[in-house]
Amino acid sequence: VPPSAEESTALVAYGDMGIWENGVMVAQALSTFLSRTNSSSSSSSSSSSSSSSSSSSSSSSVEQPPASLVLHVGDLGYADGDPVKWDKFAAQVNPYASALPYMALPGNHDDLDGLSWRYNPRPFYRTFRWGRLRVIALNTEEVAGLQRDSAQYQWLVDTLESLEFEQPRPTVVVLGHKTLLTTSTGHGGGNVPLRDLLVPLLIKFKVAAYICGDDHGYERALLVHPESGTHTCLHLLVGSGGARLDDFVPEQPSWSVFRQKSFGFLRILSFATHVSAEFFAVSSPDVPPTVIDSFMISSGGPHSEVKVPVLLVVLSVLIIVSFSVYLFRACLRLSAVPLGRRSLS
């Protein structure tokens, strides 16, 4: 049963793993990490009592909810149709994929028949609620299946429109394998046709984050509105599961907030009141994963919660100033009228 919006939970996301040495390393590190954090979260919550020491233990458990879902955003084992590679990959992730729900999207190195049979039944795109999150998973690999006149695109529009009536409003994240915007050199800065198709929708419907792989590495960027130039949606590249890492271009534009050529995984923390995230870098199976980036994920986009209050403050100040000027002028007019005339009136 998916956790409710009031429950604290965590999701793990990554892409582009493969069955090479580094993919094995990330899978082993993640397995150990999930075993440790989930068991500590369970023991902390179960040991909660009326003592003050248990109160601090309980507060720490709130900050570290157990993971309840793994998201693999494409390019699983790089099987390319080879059933032996599929089996090796399954054994590689089995320690945690057998204990937690494992949601996999198609990537360009995943034969769709093999993926459909093992991990994700067709048509590959779907949506579900998980804690405060509304997860929308797309199939970006069948190009003809994601055009404006396609069934998937219409389904996406209908799904996003329906969220306007969902209360409380969830924090919406969209998953896809293809990168939309990046400084990685892996695929030329992102898939431009897909970017032109999706970004207007993501911004219009206040999607909080788009999570993807395809390029290999980690980057937190801001999608730019094609007309206003404002940033209202996070672009999280997590193609860091184990495939050979790509370089980044030397220059780092303002919309690229954080980037690192590193293996690892993203952990999304969903609480009753907010959603946050942190990226863990993995450098060795013997060294615990290290947090190198952490941030908040807003239900209305990463900056909208700042813009709306500022606008309200400005409007409030203008109203107060205008009313004060009106009262001041009224007092001046009243003071200029003789006392006798004031009493007659």
Image: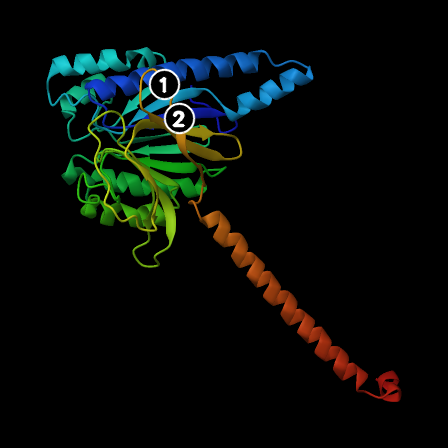
Q: How many marks?
A: 2
Q: Which residue: 62% across, 21% down? A: 56
In the rendered view, tell whether residue 287 sits above or below residue 136.
above
At a point 54% along the width and 21% down the height, the residue shown is 61
- Camera sees residue 236: no
Q: On the rendered structure, is 294 left or right of 313? A: left
Considering the image in quadrants, where does the C terminus appear? bottom right
Q: Name the amino acid, label 1.
A: Val
Occupied quadrant, residue 173: top left
Report the front residue among 120 and 83.
83
SS class, disc 1: loop
| Cβ–Cβ under 8 Å for marks 2 and 1 | yes
Decide which of 237, 153 is in the foreground and name it. Answer: 237
Q: Amino acid at mark 2?
A: Thr
Residue 110 marker: none
Colouring rule applied to residues: rainbow
- Give the percent coordinates (x, y) of residue 1: 42, 19
Q: Compared to 345, does 64 lie above or below?
A: above
Could you tell me if residue 161 is visible in this image? yes
Residue in the foreground of this view, choosing between 213 and 130 = 213
Q: Nearer the viewer, residue 95 or 327?
A: 95
Q: Circle 1 is placed at which residue position? A: 287
Alpha carbons under labels 2 and 1: distance apart = 9 Å
Residue 230 as seen in the image, left or right of residue 93: right
Query: The residue tagged with tag 2: helix, strand or loop?
Result: strand
Mark 2, residue position: 290
